[in-house]
Image: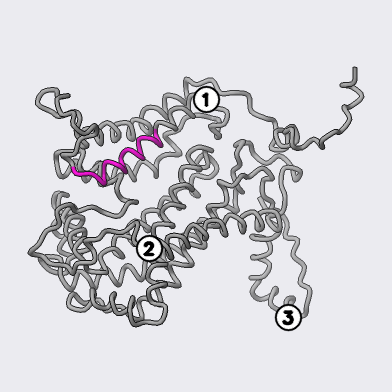
Amino acid sequence: MSGHSTYEPKTGFERWLDTRLPIVRLAWDSMVDFPTPKNLNYWWTFGGILAVCLGIQIASGVVLAMHYVPHVDYAFNSIQHIMRDVNYGWLIRYMHANGASMFFLAVYIHMFRGLYYGSYKAPREVLWIIGCLIYLAMMATAFMGYVLPWGQMSYYGAVVITNLLGAFPLVGNAITTLLWGGFSVDNPTLNRFFSLHYLLPFVIAGLVMLHIWALHVPGNNNPTGVNVKSKADTVPFHPYYTVKDGFAIVVFLLMFGVFVFYMPEALGHTDNYVPANPLVTPAHIVPEWYFLPFYAMLRAVPNKLGGVLTMFGAIAMLFVLPWLDTSKVRSMRYRPAAKLYFGIFVLACLILGYCGGKLPDDHVIPGLSTFTLLDADLNSIVWLSRIATLYYFAYFLVVMPVLGLTETPLPQPESISEPVLSHPAATPAGAAASPEKKG
């Protein structure tokens, strides 16, 4: 995609290094002269935002690890020590805790953008699958990190999630015991989770490099979904997209700063400021907000194994997505029916997130509990979760395969440049009409 390298060493040292380790050439070809479609909008800036989030998490995590004590008797107090006694420890801890939420917010937007514009379609299947692996590693890292403060919600979150693995026949109990390091969630569990939580971000960094490599082979997708036809369809990544991404990153960091400095606990849970006590169960065990849709799916199925399979199946759907969508058109910009179903899919995901944060016996419409069928309260949160879960799977397994074969898409432009140059903003104000269009 990038073609022949245009990098020319300027100094003797650069020429010497370039013949032995062409790292400057690699950076130049990847981040400066890389030909990028000229119509990318701000939804494409979340890749750069995610790279910044990963850097913040790794840097703050390394500092926190210097002061954290992974022992059930000292873990909770070591967090308080970081907050109160370590220079700027409160800032580093709040950056790390809220950074996880910002990371997931950005990755969800990044994924929904990929779904809308068909960035998972050929020849970008491997790019998409590596992205899904990054997401899976993020979920594991975030879960293990949530356990480390060793508060009430941390402890019982570990108990609930690790017990789910026991639902798998034959191997479930063995896996659970291996994670626990014993016969219950205790000190060996905390040690294991701390070790893996420290390791996995570097695994994510490696996957990110593979992700970027896989991106640079076919090149970027774009809002039209049309392949790059010529050099006229592209611009160099620098300065056009470094400036655009830089502006988006600054705006994102401003929002991040609002949470860190003005409402650092808004996305947390108050029960986690109570030391873990195996003898006192919280009234409502709830995961972090970015896991709520999957938690709602888990509770939507009355059978334990069925709920676990549903939860993991929801993630597995993402891995096979490139082969479920039968449409030849990438971008939903030219697929009106697909755009409608996608909007319902986003709504279903938001509903699942809402349901995951509610008690199963809560009512969707408070005060209305008479809407029943076969002794089932259809006004309960669990039934709303079931409807949203059903649509989630139907979207991947029914809507995408069938719609791709039956939908008649709108006409696509011949090239990326066509809609860009035909946009009213591309014509200077007050410009005279061409002789052919004059009356």
Measure the alpha-carbon separation of dots 3 and 2. 47 Å
Q: Residues within 10 Å of mark 3 (few under 14, many from 20)?
A: few
Dot 2 falls on a residue whose secondary structure is loop
How many residues crowd around disc 1 within 10 Å: few (fewer than 14), some, or many (20 or more)? Answer: some
The residue tagged 2 is 264
Q: What residue is drawn where x is 48% and y is 24%?
A: 337
In three-dimensional space, the C-alpha distance between marks 1 and 2, rounded to whole angstroms, equals 41 Å
Q: Is residue 319 left or right of residue 428?
A: left
- Say which amino acid is labelled 1: Pro
**x, y percentage for residue 276?**
16, 67
Q: Position of residue 287 (x, y in %)?
A: 26, 54
Q: In the image, is residue 337 above or below residue 300?
A: above
Q: Quadrant of residue 137?
A: bottom left
Q: Is residue 12 above or below residue 239?
A: below
Front position among marks 1 and 3: 1
Asked which quadrant contains residue 251, the reply is bottom right
Q: CA distance from mark 1 to mark 3?
A: 56 Å
Tell which of 97 and 305 is nearer to you.
97
Q: Which residues are magenta?
A: 345-359
Q: Main secondary structure of the magenta part?
A: helix
Q: Which residue is mark 3?
A: 13
Q: Looking at the image, which residue is at 34% across and 51% down?
A: 290
Q: Which residue is mark 1?
A: 336
Image spot of residue 175 (x, y percent): 19, 59
Q: Nearer the viewer, residue 112 or 426?
A: 426
* 304 within the magenta span: no
Disc 1 element: helix
Q: How many marks?
A: 3
